[in-house]
Image: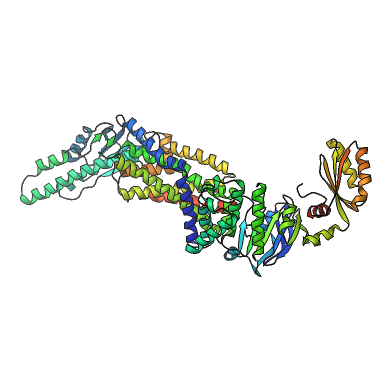
Amino acid sequence: MWRHVWLIAANGLRRSLRDRSILIQAIVAPILIAVVVGAAFGSGFSLNVTVGIKDADGSDISEQIAQGLTGAGGDGIAFSSVDADADAALDSGAYDAVIVLPAGLSDAVLSGEPAQLDVVGEAKDPLAQSVAESVAAGIAANLQTARVTAVAATSAGVDAGPAIQRAVTATPPLTVEQGEVTGTFSVMAYFAPGVAMLFLFFIIGNGARSIIEERREGTLPRILAAPVSPASVLLGKTVGVLIVGIVSMTLVWLITWLGFGAYWGDPIGVFLVIVAAVVAIAGISLLITGLARTENQADALTTIIALLFAVAGGTFFYGASGVLSDLRLFTPNGQALAAFVNLAAAQADVVEVLPQILLLTGIGVGCAAVGLVALRNKVLT
Amino acid sequence: MLQVTDLVRRFGDHTAVDRVSFQIQPGETYGLLGPNGAGKTTTISMIAGLLTPDSGEVELLGEPLTSGRKSLIGLVPQDIALYPDLSALENLQFFGKLQNLHGEHLKQRIAHVLDVVGLTDRAKDRIDTYSGGMKRRANIAVGLLHEPQLLILDEPTVGVDPQSRNSILEAVDVLGGSGMAVLYTTHYMEEAERLCDRVGIIDSGRLIAEGTRDELMQRLGENSTVTFRVNGGAEQTHAWRVELAGMPGVSGVQGEDGQVAVVAANGPSLIAPAVQAAQSHGLDVVGVEVAEPDLEAVFLHLTGKALRD
């Protein structure tokens, strides 16, 4: 069976490689658009993140940290103190993320105990949360310095006050440059995967619809007249579209990274998100193909859904707020982009984007299961 | 070799194949002759395992057809079932591997079938650069690739030029003589007469007659076909046809606009009253021909309509 699966997948790949329109859609177009958009935003991409500082400790140390931050900020990032509860502050819409300096922070630092900061953000805005987490990590590093200083000073019997003062008021290592956050997040690293996913809907949709096309053109009955099971045909087609999708998006990643310097983040994490995104898109495409009454209807539905997901998912307007911002979470594009932003902006590792990877894979597998059953009933019986 | 018993297939309320039974012996070429929509393709789809019968049985070499035994059959569909963006060689490699052919054996088989269909020189060209006839021949090559014991050809000459058609018929003739059982569907009477050892006549899903050419001719009895060439309007011709159909001994009338064929007992005696009737309808009879009985006449006699209707 698996030999037939591979034969059918390889045949699909061979035909895809000969189709120049697929190469253009899969690789050239996403890179070109990302480069053009990246160039357009290169000198004017504005990050607009407001991070709240909730001082739940109320000590001199926490107050100094909060004051230091509210005076810091930079292009597109503002810090301001929060009086209300962190969740309420987020709900008010005035803040994109809140860093909480917990009660007992000062005591912990002065006694040499580990201190922990909390970052509260909304999943729909991972970029803001990433910025806040970067800042919190910087503060934590400073507090670690203070904690070590305190322990050392206590052991030596000297006054640690000035050293701790310097440590807690040091500026967190956050830099905001034109178009970049913490020096790693480029506009191209955002738009390239977004546009690539949009085109993947068309490429993978074509691959999924090829089952119906092959039945119409007679090659599918000829395959089934050989000792090949319907399951092998469906699996072969699915594996074929997955390989095309993964290879094309991986090439977009590698070319924009190595050729244009757009760092997408931890390579393992990026690759797994790519695989998960392709699985999700393939599953949705199979579902559309399985449920549509005709090939043309499947084609039209794919176009509509691809564009809807792209717009709602933030492919073109990441900074959008309101309804679009909420809708982002309900699209595979939005979930994948959130993971890519986490990887690129916050330099998250694979564990931190695991929820999105699992969700995307789940969407893909679930949709594919329904779609393949429908296709089997429609095309192969 | 092949035993088909009481095969039935319905699509909704329409019965496409209605209790069709026949058998084919090894080395025999069996023709399934009938007009478009008669149920030929549905029948062979069930034999090839592409459609599940509502009832009835298909047995190959005395056993039911299972997925693993599909290699016993070579199917040449009516449509060109090839990938147009691949070469003939690539198509043959792909379908050959699906039939579990490998390595040197696959290469030898590909070379052989390309030679049989006369496409060796164009093997590396893409299918979409082929003429209609060449595509048909490549289509047949794929069906032959794995040396099936039963070759099913579904109207393999539809839409091809006379030269390619002749080439295809010659190839099938050779295959029939090589010991392979062949099931050949067509609505061209002359192909069935030329190629087939036995012919089954199918109409409206039912096998209405079966036998060798001579056996089928006997079904005509004393009937013969008289063809009239007339000048006149369509309405007058239609009215004349209706009158002809009511004449004693007439079992079938077909044709329009200038040529009308009549199957009748003792055909020559029909000529005089038929010409008289034509004149009464304002038609000029410009020619009369009494033809030798053929399968077309048998079909007309059995169904009252022409194969191409």
Residue pictured at 84% horizontal, 60% vertical: B218
Q: Is residue A165 left or right of residue B110?
A: left
Q: Position of residue A71 (x, y in %)?
A: 21, 32
* Residue ID at (67%, 55%): B169
Q: Please give the count of numbered marks on the rendered protein.
A: 0
In the picture shown, does residue A299 fall above or below B96?
Answer: above
Residue A345 lies, with reference to residue B212, above or below; the image says above
Question: Does residue A380 show up?
Answer: no
Residue A380 position in % (x across, y down):
58, 54
Q: Quadrant of residue A63?
A: top left
Residue A202 visible to the viewer: yes
Between B252 and A218, the one nearer to me in the picture: B252
Q: In the visual, does A28 lie left or right of A132? A: right
Image quarter hosting the N terminus of chain B: bottom right
Residue B263 shown left or right of residue B108 in the figure: right
Find the residue positioned furthest to the bottom.
B62
The quadrant in which residue A332 appears is: top left
Residue A51: x and y in percent read 28, 36
Q: Nearer the viewer, residue B64 or A161?
A: B64
| Nearer-the-camera pick, A35 or B28 | B28
Measured as percent of width and height from the top left, residue A268 is found at 32, 50
Picture residue at 87% right of the left edge, 37% below the top: B236
